[in-house]
Amino acid sequence: MERIASARGLTPAQPPEVSTLRRRVRVLRKRLDNLEVRRARIMMSLLRDSPVDVLAIGDSMWAFTAPYDEDQRHLGTMIAHALGPETVMHGVVGAGYNARLIDAYLGLAQRGGFRPVVIVPLTTRLVTVAWSEHPNYAYRAAVRAISRMPGDIPLRRIRKAVRASSPADFEAYDRLEITAFGETAPIGDFRRRLKQPERFGLDREGREKLLYAFHHGERVGPDAPPLEAVRQLGRRIASMGSPVVAYETAVPVMRGEELHGPVFRTQTLENQKCVRDAFQEGFGDSVEILRTGSIFSSSEFIDPEDASEHLNAAGRLRLTELLVNAVQRAL
């Protein structure tokens, strides 16, 4: 599993000019060697070098731990440890990795002739307008680049320069209208209130309620355009012939219900069903989807106030047990 370890307080402070230079290098590298394409290069290198039994494509839930966790292992590390050293696992993990991007990664692996057991998340939030159209999380350029690469492409050619999201991109994004729990407004209106809650008369709970609405308040109908990417992901995995472990990304339903009432749980469950149905429709044959989207209590999230899907050690351990059992059945 790709993982970045931090040793806070152990690295000497760098002179300002060195820190500035390093930031510039990171920005330049990110532009000339897009991170998502770079991860495709790492994935193909590992697939070609040694047998990979399990390929996991994960969203940000795979990348976070809580500062207060005694067990600081990321989700992928927990799964790899539970599977044991005889099972080789690789993870491609990043913030907001949606069905389009996951399909692009798996398409490249398929063209290379690989068919490991595949772990994929079904993340309801990423099929809403607010998140499927977000300039930083749509990943359109990376998806196009990876999707055009042949399976035998030399590793040195798995590279792409991608323009960073511009102010104009965000201006267009902010003009899009969404309806979240009955309130229809431009996305920019939601974002401005979340960034400056005091200016708009929001106290801490008021801001949290708005954040939950922005993250989870859109209703996903069966004809929602982003669901086509979920169907395509199902078709992709079926055509690969790979055993699949599909699961729902967690939603902090208990806290959402406290803030918005019963409608939060009802709508969340309906949205999750639409996503499951889309994946099933694309896959064709009967497929097991782990119903993990609404099972976690507030105490199993890193910070229920931020409305995200990030699980703390207790939540990650419970999800690990469910995923590992499913992977072992698939293997």
Image: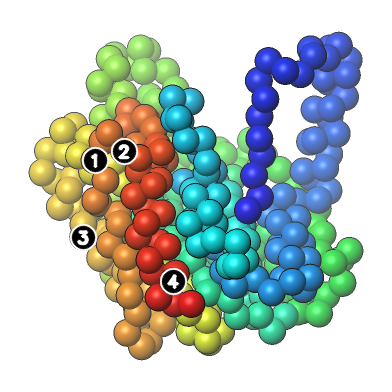
Residue behind mark 1: 297
Residue behind mark 2: 300
Cα distance in 3D space between marks 3 and 4: 30 Å
Q: Secondary structure at mark 2?
A: helix
Q: Amino acid at mark 4?
A: Gln
Cα distance in 3D space between marks 2 and 4: 24 Å
Q: x, y percentage for residue 140?
A: 62, 59
Q: Amino acid at mark 1?
A: Ser
Q: Is residue 220 above or below residue 106?
A: above
Q: Secondary structure at mark 3?
A: helix
Q: Secondary structure at mark 4?
A: helix
Crowd tier of the residue under label 3, counting other residues whose Cα lies within 10 Å: few below 14, some 14–19, many 20 or above: some
> Extreme left residue here?
262
Crowd tier of the residue under label 4, counting other residues whose Cα lies within 10 Å: few below 14, some 14–19, many 20 or above: few
Does label 3 or label 1 sit earlier along the sequence?
A: 3
Which of labels 3 and 4 is toward the front? Answer: 4
Q: Quadrant of residue 282?
A: bottom left
Which of labels 1 and 4 is toward the front? Answer: 4
* Left or right: 112 in relation to 261: right
Does label 1 or label 4 sit earlier along the sequence?
A: 1
Q: Amino acid at mark 3?
A: Glu
Disc 2 vs disc 1: Cβ atoms closer than 8 Å?
Answer: yes
Residue under the point 31% across and 38% down: 300
Q: Which label belongs to residue 270?
A: 3
Q: Is residue 97 above or below residue 120?
A: above
The reply to whether residue 26 is in sight is yes
Q: Secondary structure at mark 1?
A: loop
Q: Nearer the viewer, residue 28 or 15?
A: 15
Q: x, y percentage for residue 80?
A: 54, 57
Q: Which label belongs to residue 206?
A: none
Q: Nearer the viewer, residue 50 or 102?
A: 50
Q: x, y percentage for residue 159?
A: 82, 59
